[in-house]
């Protein structure tokens, strides 16, 4: 066999070997490496072509055709293998990225209402179910609605700068951040009477209030709910019945109730309301300081001067009113030791309360 025959045989062997290795490539990267190994500038086919220079000039065109045929065969083999590997890798990727849509989804934390808002909603809902109309009022008040109309005299300590947040005077009228939700009582009675709303009327007024105070049981901004009813023959018995139903519903248990004589400028007679300790059932504990009772709110019969300030005849009509601190009740219901936790935005506390 001459030089020409030897080159043809070597080219044939290289072609068979290359095509066999192409088909065994496991991925596109391996196939690319084989392309360089056989068809690159320093590849196996280049090494074979180095022997072409030893051939006579007449035989070189013949071997050139053979080389072109091998290149074509290898290119077609590479293309076919690339197509097969591309399909295979796509199948592998699909399999590796396959999702089982029947599996349970990932658990994600859901937001919830702030515990104070939860308390507001719960308290308001109880009174709404009892037939009380929900009312709102401005948080920036004038002295008439916040003090004068509620029979609070000019010398009362609540009007002092160290108790109340006063803001800039407007048209010679001192304005302030309301210290209680009782002004809503005045505004609502005036509005309903102007609209010729027939008595009786029953209103629950939730909202924010402000006082200069801050410790474990007091905050400069907190929430109150004002509740009042005005009509004919309204008595302390009605007040106690409403309180009994509300407190038992809110604490989700029958609670004992007592009214202690007290003084509020806007009610007469007035009473502090205590419930049997919800922690020790009245036996005496650290929370109730051994007394078996917990103070929860202030109440009383609407003072005749308050009715007079809105044009209601106190000789014909009477009413009861009481105001409760939302944070206070939420703290008692959920055994929260420090009121400041409501306003410090500790996520651990908020998650616990939102659960």
Image: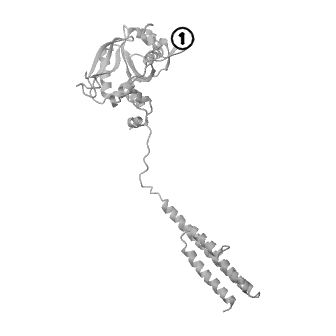
Q: In this view, does 285 lie to the left or right of 90?
A: left
Q: Where is residue 258 in the image (x, y as percent from the top left)?
A: 27, 19
Q: The N terminus is located in which quarter?
A: bottom right
Q: Is residue 302 left or right of residue 16?
A: left
Q: In which quarter of the image is residue 110?
A: top left
Q: Nearer the viewer, residue 298 or 12?
A: 12
Q: Position of residue 240 (x, y in %)?
A: 30, 19
**Residue in view at x 31 percent, y 29 percent:** 251
Mark 1: give few (<14), some (14-19) or many (20+) Cα within 10 Å: few
Q: Nearer the viewer, residue 98 or 292?
A: 292
Q: Position of residue 166 (x, y in %)?
A: 50, 15
Q: Nearer the viewer, residue 119 or 18?
A: 18
Q: In which quarter of the image is residue 314?
A: top left
Q: Nearer the viewer, residue 300 or 113?
A: 113
Q: The C terminus is located in which quarter?
A: top left
Q: Name the residue under label 1.
A: 173
- Which residue sits furthest bottom? 1
- Which residue sits furthest right? 57
Q: Is residue 13 left or right of residue 95?
A: right
Q: What element carries label 1?
A: strand
Residue 301, compared with residue 130, is above or below; it is above
Residue 101, compared with residue 65, is above or below; it is above
Residue 355, compared with residue 333, is above or below; it is below
Would residue 56 be visible to someone looking at this image? yes
């Amino acid at each position: 066999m001459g030089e020409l025959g030897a080159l043809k045989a070597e080219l044939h062997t290289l072609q068979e070997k290359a095509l066999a290795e192409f088909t065994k490539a496991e991925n596109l990267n391996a196939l690319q490496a084989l392309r360089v190994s056989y068809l690159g500038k320093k590849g196996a086919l280049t090494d074979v072509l180095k022997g072409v220079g030893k051939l006579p000039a007449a035989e070189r065109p013949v071997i050139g055709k053979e080389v072109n045929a091998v290149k074509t065969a290898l290119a077609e083999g590479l293309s076919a293998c690339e197509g097969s590997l591309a399909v295979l890798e796509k199948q592998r990727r699909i399999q590796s990225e396959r999702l089982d849509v029947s599996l349970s989804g990932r658990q994600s934390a859901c937001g919830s209402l702030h515990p104070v808002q939860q308390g507001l909603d719960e308290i308001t809902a109880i009174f709404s179910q009892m037939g009380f109309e929900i009312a709102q009022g401005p948080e920036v008040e004038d002295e008439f609605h916040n003090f004068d109309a509620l029979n609070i005299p000019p010398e009362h300590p609540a009007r002092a700068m160290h108790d109340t947040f006063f803001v800039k005077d407007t048209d010679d009228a001192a304005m302030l951040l309301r210290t209680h939700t009782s002004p809503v009582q005045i505004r609502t009675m005036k509005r309903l009477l102007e609209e010729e709303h027939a008595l009786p009327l029953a209103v629950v007024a939730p909202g924010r209030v402000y006082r200069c105070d801050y410790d474990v049981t007091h905050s400069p901004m907190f929430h109150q709910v004002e509740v009042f009813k005005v009509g004919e023959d309204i008595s302390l018995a009605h007040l106690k019945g409403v309180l009994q139903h509300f407190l038992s519903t809110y604490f989700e248990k029958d609670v004992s109730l007592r009214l202690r004589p007290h003084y509020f400028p806007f009610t007469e007679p007035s009473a502090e309301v205590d419930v049997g300790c919800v922690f020790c059932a009245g036996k005496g504990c650290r929370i109730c300081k051994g007394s078996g009772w917990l103070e929860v709110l202030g109440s009383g019969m609407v003072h005749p001067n308050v009715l007079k300030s809105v044009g209601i005849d106190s000789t014909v009509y009477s009413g009861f009113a009481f105001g409760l601190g939302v944070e206070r009740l939420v703290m008692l219901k959920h055994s929260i030791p420090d009121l400041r936790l409501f306003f410090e935005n500790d996520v651990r506390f908020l998650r616990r309360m939102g659960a």
